[in-house]
Image (cartoon, rainbow, N blue to C red):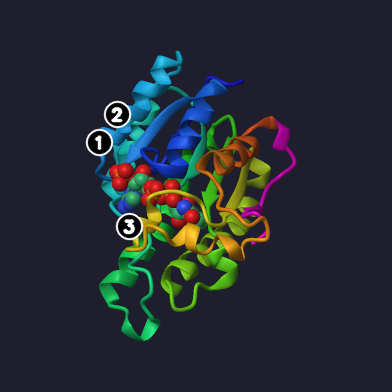
């Protein structure tokens, strides 16, 4: 148990929501970042408070550096930062080939998934690193099995953004390993959330479930359980490592 603060980007829905609730149950004070869905973020805060946990909701589009600075400022006012979950992420429309992609689409995916995660990690390291007077902590980055599979004919730009996250996890982990910070990645497979609808194909995860060795989609709770384990002292010798939570995919 810890009473430290965890910042979760995209904590309002899906995997981030499940992580917020699971981390609150372990005593973390939760900063629920959300891009635009205030109603969903407020609902997560209410659910945590109903279980005697502590949480606040803060608007943060991670493509906006000023939003990220405001997110961490709010976290500073809430307690001592102990963890960051770089979860907020997007896909472009599914089924678009690279030779059909607009520059705006690619830039948006990279700005949210890659630059946003790196900037959030920068703010977390400034606060948690013993080099800066901090007490250490954990950063968990949400990748995807798409980083390994490449997502051809689906969203190669998204897969490439998650490949960048995998490199970032390894490199940052080494950079701060002597400063009390562990950095780990999670590569979810087909998880039952609204991200597939956002890509224009709500049924995508279920349609492809037969391709998963375990023959089913995963739940947001199953990913959240792996994230909170990585955040815990039970994972005290785990850094620069990436865990597949994908039913074998
Ligand atoms: P989701 O259900 O679509 O939820 C997305 C969350 O991210 C929401 O809380 C949303 O906030 C937030 N978000 C969207 N754009 C953002 C932005 N620009 N800045 C900050 N936050 C933003 O997604 P999910 O399936 O839970 O995915 C979470 C993470 O897991 C993502 O990084 C995704 O790439 C990764 N992942 C998911 C799957 C899967 O099958 N679901 C598989 C592999 C990896 P609002 O509520 O305000 O819109």
Q: How many marks?
A: 3
Residue at 30% of width from left, 35% of height from top?
Answer: 40
The residues bearing labels 2 and 1 have C-alpha atoms spaced at a distance of 6 Å
Given contact means CB atoms under 8 Å apart, are the residues at marks 2 and 1 in contact? yes
Instruction: Give coordinates of residue 246: x percent, y percent.
Output: 62, 55
Q: Is residue 178 magenta?
A: no
The residues bearing labels 3 and 2 have C-alpha atoms spaced at a distance of 21 Å
Q: Is residue 213 left or right of residue 98?
A: right
Residue at 49% of width from left, 39% of height from top?
Answer: 84
Instruction: Give coordinates of residue 60: x percent, y percent.
Output: 30, 43
Q: Secondary structure at mark 1?
A: helix
| 209 shown above or below 103 | above
Please tell me whether mark 3 or mark 2 is closer to you in this view: 3
Mark 2, ligand 1, within 8 Å: the answer is no
| 25 shown above or below 37 | above
Q: Which residues are magenta?
A: 234-249
Q: Secondary structure at mark 2?
A: helix
Mark 3, ligand 1, within 8 Å: the answer is yes
Instruction: Give coordinates of residue 141: x percent, y percent.
Output: 53, 50
Given contact means CB atoms under 8 Å apart, are the residues at marks 3 and 2 in contact? no
**Which residue is the extreme one toward the top?**
52
Count neighbours of disc 1 (C-alpha within 10 A) and say few if under 14, some if 14 to 19, many if 20 or more.
Answer: some
Judging by the rendered image, the residue that carries numbered circle 3 is 198
Q: Is residue 248 magenta?
A: yes
Of mark 3 and mark 2, the one earlier in the sequence is: 2
Give residue 42's mark.
2
Give residue 38's mark.
1
Q: Is any atom of residue 81 visible in this view? A: no
Instruction: Give coordinates of residue 161: x percent, y percent.
Output: 46, 66
| 41 shown above or below 201 | above
């Amino acid at each position: 148990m810890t009473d430290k603060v965890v910042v979760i980007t995209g904590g309002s829905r899906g995997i981030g929501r499940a992580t917020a609730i699971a981390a609150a149950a372990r005593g973390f004070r939760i900063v629920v970042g959300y891009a635009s869905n205030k109603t969903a973020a407020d609902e997560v805060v209410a659910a945590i408070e109903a279980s005697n946990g502590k949480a606040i909701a803060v608007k943060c589009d991670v493509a906006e550096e000023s939003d990220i600075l405001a997110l961490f400022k709010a976290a500073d006012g809430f307690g001592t930062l102990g963890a960051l979950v770089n979860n907020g992420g997007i896909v472009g429309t599914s089924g678009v080939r690279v030779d059909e992609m607009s520059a705006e689409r690619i830039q948006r995916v990279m700005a949210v998934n890659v630059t946003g995660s790196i900037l959030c990690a920068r703010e977390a390291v400034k606060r948690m690193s013993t080099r800066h007077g901090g007490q250490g902590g954990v950063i968990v980055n949400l990748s995807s099995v798409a980083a390994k599979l490449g997502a051809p004919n689906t969203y190669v730009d998204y897969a490439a953004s998650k490949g960048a996250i995998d490199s970032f996890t390894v490199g940052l982990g080494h950079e701060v390993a002597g400063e009390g910070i562990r950095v780990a990645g999670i590569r979810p497979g087909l998880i039952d959330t609204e991200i597939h609808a956002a890509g224009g194909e709500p049924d995508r995860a279920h349609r492809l479930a037969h391709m998963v060795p375990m023959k089913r989609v995963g739940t947001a709770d199953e990913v959240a359980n792996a994230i909170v384990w990585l955040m815990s002292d039970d994972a005290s010798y785990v850094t620069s490592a990436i865990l597949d939570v994908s039913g074998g995919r």
